[in-house]
Image (cartoon, rainbow, N blue to C red):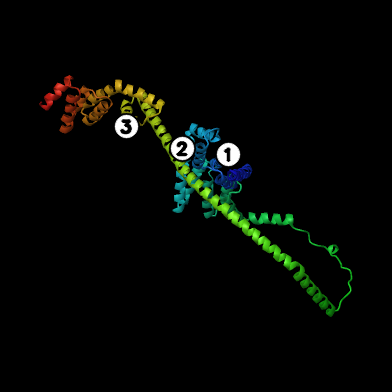
């Protein structure tokens, strides 16, 4: 229990240090400290939530979602991560923009690797326009400008990065090179040199020593030798034995300390390894949840747009387009209650009136000599609602077009599905049984 409390205290210390750095906009340093905090205590939800906020601030929305989902899985009660996830879920455009920006960034990276710098810069500018805090995009854009030796634009991109994350290591290295190329580094060095330099000594500053009595060379040599002998004697008699004893005691104590630290480190490594394995599984699970969340959101938007297009086409009087869109919709994929209700309303309109309107248009096209168009309209009608009359008309149209197999299949269908209909008897007569 004492060991766990020690890990918790270490984790809290790292979190407090990270919080101070985050307040100073040192996001990279804060992120590293938060990762260390989580290594010591994976249940430090404040550290994990702050790490998610830093990822989100740097434009890494997917990584932020992973951290918040893990946080909710570990500690679901009174967790601030629930608020962050709910805010993003209420604004599905954030997920869509994030997904689009990641794709565009990867495309820009591909362009840059294949020497298509103009396309890469254009793509990155679009990414930055949608996500001004996307640090990866700013740094890649700066690298492309540096390759073109456009140092001013490169410096602007790096300045934006350092405004978001003041100690970003990559941006600092690149900014140093930009300053060298533009001469700003030399100017800054001169300013520092002037600020900390000392004034030159004047004649009044020179100290003139007092006169001393001169000694003969032999006396100087004798004094030096006597001093050396006395120093060696004192060292061997007094200093050396005590120093050797102290060194031996220190070495023994250090050896004991190292042994204890090694045992503690081995235990800590074993615990951290098991924690890492557990976190890796949680990360994979969270990544899968994020992917499912994105897929569900894309499916919802697609279904909503499809139903809206059907309604717009029907309101404009284009029943053919509305029917085409309706028959191409997979109703089994609609699970949202609001969308399902909208689908049922559209289905009722299609099955009550639109199907017959399509059949009437098909008959008019047939009479006008447009057999192909008539066949398409009849097929739309019977796809929406199978009525024996419309099936019979489509079968007769196929007969007149020479599509005997399709016509016979429809006659058989009428006989089997609508045996009491007058069109069943007419179908038997045509088929000859």
Between residue 72 and residue 228, name the one nearer to us: 228
Q: CA distance from mark 3 to mark 2?
A: 25 Å
Q: 10 Å neighbourhood of mark 1: few (<14), some, or many (≥20)? A: some
Relative to 292, is 177 above or below? below
| Residue 149, position as x, y percentages in the image | 54, 55
Task: State if disc 2 and disc 3 touch (CB < 8 Å).
Answer: no
Q: 10 Å neighbourhood of mark 3: few (<14), some, or many (≥20)? A: few
Please state if 120 lies on the left or on the right of 205 as rendered: left
- Judge depth for marks 1 and 2 and give the one in front: 1
Relative to 360, is 248 above or below? below
Between residue 256 and residue 19, name the one nearer to us: 256
| Residue 384, position as x, y percentages in the image | 28, 26
| Residue 277, position as x, y percentages in the image | 48, 47
Q: CA distance from mark 3 to mark 1?
A: 48 Å
* SS assignment at label 2: helix
Residue labelled with disc 3: 328
- Judge depth for marks 3 and 1 and give the one in front: 1
| Residue 223, position as x, y percentages in the image | 83, 75
The picture quadrant where one finds residue 419 is top left
Residue labelled with disc 2: 96
Q: Is residue 181 visible?
A: no
Q: Which mark is residue 46?
A: 1
* SS assignment at label 3: loop
Between residue 8 and residue 149, name the one nearer to us: 8
Q: Which callout, 3 or 2, points at the residue further toward the start of the chain?
A: 2
């Amino acid at each position: 229990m004492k060991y766990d409390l020690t890990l918790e205290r270490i984790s809290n210390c790292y979190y407090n240090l990270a919080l101070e750095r985050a307040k100073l906009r040192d996001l990279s340093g804060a992120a590293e400290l938060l990762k260390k905090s989580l290594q010591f205590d994976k249940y430090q939800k404040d550290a994990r939530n702050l790490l998610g906020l830093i990822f989100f601030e740097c434009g890494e929305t997917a990584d932020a979602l992973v951290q918040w989902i893990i946080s909710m899985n570990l500690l679901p009660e009174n967790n601030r991560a629930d608020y962050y996830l709910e805010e993003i879920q209420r604004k599905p455009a954030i997920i869509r923009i994030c997904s689009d920006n990641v794709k565009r960034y990867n495309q820009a990276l591909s362009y840059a690797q294949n020497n298509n710098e103009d396309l890469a810069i254009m793509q990155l500018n679009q990414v930055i326009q949608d996500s001004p805090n996307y640090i990866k995009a700013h740094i890649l854009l700066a690298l492309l400008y540096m390759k073109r030796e456009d140092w001013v634009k490169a410096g602007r991109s790096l300045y934006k990065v350092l405004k978001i994350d003041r100690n970003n290591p990559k941006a600092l290295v690149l900014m140093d090179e930009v300053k060298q190329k533009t001469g700003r580094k030399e100017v800054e060095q001169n300013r520092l040199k002037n600020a900390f330099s000392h004034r030159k000594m004047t004649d009044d500053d020179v100290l003139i020593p007092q006169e001393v009595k001169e000694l003969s060379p032999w006396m100087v040599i004798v004094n030096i030798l006597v001093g050396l002998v006395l120093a060696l004697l004192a060292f061997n008699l007094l200093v050396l034995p005590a120093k050797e004893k102290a060194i031996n005691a220190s070495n023994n104590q250090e050896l004991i300390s190292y042994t204890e630290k090694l045992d503690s480190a081995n235990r800590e490594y074993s615990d951290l390894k098991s924690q890492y394995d557990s976190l890796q599984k949680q990360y994979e699970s969270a990544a899968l949840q994020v992917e499912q969340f994105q897929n569900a959101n894309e499916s919802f938007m697609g279904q909503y747009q499809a139903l809206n297009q059907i309604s717009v086409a029907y309101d404009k009087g284009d029943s053919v387009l509305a029917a085409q869109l309706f028959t191409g919709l997979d109703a089994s994929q609609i699970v949202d209650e609001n969308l399902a209700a909208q689908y049922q309303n559209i289905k009722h309109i299609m099955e009550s009136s639109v199907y017959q309107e399509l059949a009437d248009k098909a008959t008019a096209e047939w009479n006008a000599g447009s057999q192909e168009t008539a066949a398409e309209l009849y097929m739309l009608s019977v796809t929406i609602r199978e009525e024996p009359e419309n099936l019979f008309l489509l079968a007769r149209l196929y007969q007149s077009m020479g599509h005997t197999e399709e016509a016979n299949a429809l006659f058989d269908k009428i006989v089997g599905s609508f045996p009491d209909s007058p069109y069943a008897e007419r179908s038997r007569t045509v088929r000859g049984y």
